[in-house]
Image (cartoon, grey):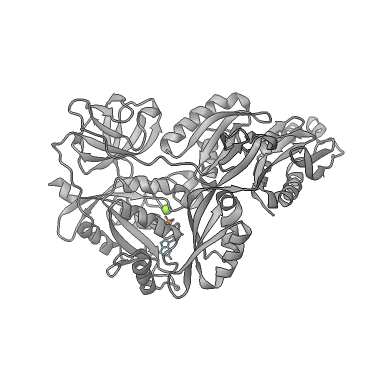
């Protein structure tokens, strides 16, 4: 009977269409938080999320709602990120839900990640409730958006909720629709336990805490459990729900979304996608897990202080628990020492991981330039996967190189189609098709090298379309390209961590740009530092960092102690994210200089 009163749903949308704000309104309307506790985007609990105004992690909360039929309902709501880099969070949350609220901005209409995310929901057989949000905006055109949802996505939007999360309009109607249209969970209480792990986090007291959706059976503290894929066995110490702070419960049953703790110390024992069952009376087979995510880009992560290598490994392991798409393995660099080659889903993901490592684990890191994975075919017929440009075999041993291509879709108003095509072409794009979304907007599709997309395509796309274009992409396969490796020499020494791979046609130009950039970024010393770019042994570009004349450090030893302390402090902070490479101090920025193509 309780099951009939449960509703499990995710909120999905393109970035900035208002998912987190709608979650806020639901928490308020259901008195889950008091007015005093309320703050904007309440579920974005990470500092980083609040500062950047984006959702990075999904968040599952339980709220209680008394419907117009007089009955009390329990909602489990999962807010999700909208950025393309975090779509694995969306797909994981959808596997735990029975329905999805699809939020579309009434002024922007359907955008690239609206489509990508709603297709994920459709694949998961979820009931979809369209909500047209921001109807308070002067530019809002709810009727046009309603039509667009029907034409482009192909779902019925005739009774889409018209809402303004900002003004609180449409929220009561939405709550009633959740009760009526999203199906109650099914799953027998008497059947053997099957619970899907869809998220996890590390707590230093309780060990690994898992967010689960119970599909069948009942789970309670004291139960002996087994993880069906890893084979690990534990005893449950606590179960509960987040509302939005953790609340202990006596049990979780089929249909519930909640958390479980079992003093799990080894994070490999309990990965998202695994199924929990009872040791006695186990389920016959595990639930379908998740497709493993393949990273799109790799970069090297190095502690600025070599002694912190083990701390970095521990930190990466803990973050991986919370972020199943993160991959890493040890690597060494002549220039930077011991570190990890780390795989990410995109540059925002990379940025977020680096910041989380620095903030949550107090590490000081250098991240090397991101690279896609190349396939190098050697003259003796072997294929070498190269995720670190400095490891590309010597030109004399290479027969051909392939690089990953993506199928990109770009949604943009008519007026900017010319600009988009020009940009895509300049990034080695190959035109595929163009479809009209409505009278004013088109969906342009291109095949493009992933490396070009990752570098500065998105920024350029935004600036050349006044922010109107949205982009989504998926890997389409590998293609042979004319690629060369560029090495960078500082003061005559090759710095392996600065090598990059680029199309032959762009080699000269990018070499020129990067040597110029490095000249601006690398601090002067009391001697001249040549900066050179080379293909093999041939120097293709160079610049010179001039020597400075005065020795400013001698000043530290004079003057009053207060001033001296300040100077030392400033010097210490200046050292952050800086690495001595031979006789040259290389700041973090230098490793990212390759991302700037002009
Ligand atoms: P998310 O990325 O989908 O989670 O979007 P957010 O909930 O973070 O909202 C993005 C921005 O849109 C924020 O600045 C919100 O204040 C604003 N916003 C959300 N809902 C509305 C609305 O109904 N009307 C208006 N005018 N702004 C809104
Ligand atoms: Mg959000």
Quarter containing the C terminus: bottom right
Indicate left or right for 436 with 337 as reference.
left
Q: Position of residue 597 (x, y in %)?
A: 67, 52
Q: Residue furthest bottom?
A: 439
Return the residue nearer the eye: 52 or 397.
Answer: 397
In the rendered image, the vertical position of residue 36 relative to residue 325, given as above or below = below
Indicate left or right for 548 with 115 as reference.
right
Q: Residue at x 58, y 65 (%)?
A: 421
Q: Residue at x 35, y 72 (%)?
A: 147
Indicate left or right for 96 with 462 as reference.
left
Q: Position of residue 412 (x, y in %)?
A: 50, 67
Q: Residue furthest right?
A: 549
Quadrant of residue 572 within the rendered picture: top right
Q: Position of residue 437 (x, y in %)?
A: 43, 69
Quadrant of residue 110 within the rendered picture: bottom left
Q: Is residue 104 visible?
A: yes
The number of discs equals 0
Q: Is residue 574 visible?
A: no
Return the residue nearer the eye: 176 or 468.
Answer: 468
Q: Residue at x 52, y 63 (%)?
A: 469
In the rendered image, the vertical position of residue 444 relative to residue 512, given as above or below = below
Q: Position of residue 231 (x, y in %)?
A: 31, 26
């Amino acid at each position: 009977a309780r099951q009939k009163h449960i509703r499990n749903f995710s909120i999905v949308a393109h970035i900035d269409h208002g998912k987190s704000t709608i979650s806020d309104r639901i928490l308020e309307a259901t008195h889950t938080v008091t007015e005093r506790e309320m703050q904007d985007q309440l579920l974005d609990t990470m500092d980083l999320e609040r500062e950047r105004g984006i959702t990075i992690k999904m968040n599952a909360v339980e709220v209680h709602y008394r419907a117009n039929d007089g009955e009390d309902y329990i909602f489990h709501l999962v807010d999700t990120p909208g950025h393309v880099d975090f779509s694995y969070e969306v797909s994981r949350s959808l596997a735990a839900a029975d329905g999805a609220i699809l939020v579309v901005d009434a002024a922007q209409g359907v955008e690239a990640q609206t489509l990508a995310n709603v297709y994920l929901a459709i694949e998961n057989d979820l009931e979809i409730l369209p909500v047209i949000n921001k109807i308070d905006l002067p530019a809002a055109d709810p009727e046009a958006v309603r039509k667009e949802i029907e034409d482009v996505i192909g779902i019925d939007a005739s009774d889409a909720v018209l809402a303004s999360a900002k003004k609180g309009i449409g929220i009561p109607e939405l709550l009633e629709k959740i009760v009526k249209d999203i199906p109650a969970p099914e799953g027998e209480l008497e059947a053997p336990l099957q619970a899907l792990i869809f998220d996890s986090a590390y707590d230093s007291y309780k060990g690994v805490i898992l967010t689960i959706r119970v599909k069948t059976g009942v789970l309670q503290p004291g139960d002996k459990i087994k993880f069906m894929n890893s084979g690990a066995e534990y005893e449950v110490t606590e179960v509960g729900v987040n509302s939005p702070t953790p609340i202990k419960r006596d049990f979780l049953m089929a249909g519930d979304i909640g958390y479980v703790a079992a003093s799990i110390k080894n994070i490999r024992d309990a990965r998202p996608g695994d199924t929990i069952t009872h040791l006695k009376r186990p389920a016959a087979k595990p639930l379908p897990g998740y497709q493993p995510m393949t990273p799109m880009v790799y970069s090297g992560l190095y502690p600025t202080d070599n002694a912190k290598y083990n701390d970095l490994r521990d930190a990466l392991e803990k973050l991986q628990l919370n972020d199943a798409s993160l991959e890493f393995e040890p690597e060494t660099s002549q220039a930077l020492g011991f570190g990890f080659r780390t795989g990410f889903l995109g540059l925002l993901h990379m940025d977020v991981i680096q910041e989380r490592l620095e903030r949550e684990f107090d590490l000081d890191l250098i991240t090397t330039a991101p690279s896609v994975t190349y396939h190098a075919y050697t003259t003796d017929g072997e294929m070498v996967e190269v995720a670190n440009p400095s490891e590309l075999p010597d030109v004399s041993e290479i027969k051909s190189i392939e690089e990953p291509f993506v199928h990109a879709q770009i949604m943009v108003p008519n007026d900017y189609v010319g600009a988009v095509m020009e940009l895509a072409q300049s990034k080695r794009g190959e035109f595929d098709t163009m479809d009209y979304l409505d009278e004013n907007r088109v969906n342009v599709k291109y095949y493009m090298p992933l490396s070009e997309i990752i570098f500065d395509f998105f920024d350029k796309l935004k600036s050349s379309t006044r922010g109107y274009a949205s982009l989504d992409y998926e890997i389409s396969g590998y293609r042979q390209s004319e690629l060369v490796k560029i090495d960078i020499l500082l003061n005559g020494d090759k710095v392996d961590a600065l090598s990059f791979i680029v199309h032959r046609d762009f080699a000269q130009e990018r070499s020129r740009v990067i040597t110029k950039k490095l000249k601006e970024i690398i601090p002067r010393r009391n001697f001249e530092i040549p900066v050179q770019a080379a293909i093999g042994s041939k120097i293709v570009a160079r610049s010179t960092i001039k020597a400075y004349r005065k020795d400013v450090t001698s000043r530290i030893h004079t003057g009053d102690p207060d001033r001296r302390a300040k100077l030392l402090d400033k010097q210490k902070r200046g050292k952050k994210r800086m690495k001595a490479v031979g006789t040259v101090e290389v700041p973090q920025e230098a490793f990212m200089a390759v991302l700037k193509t002009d």
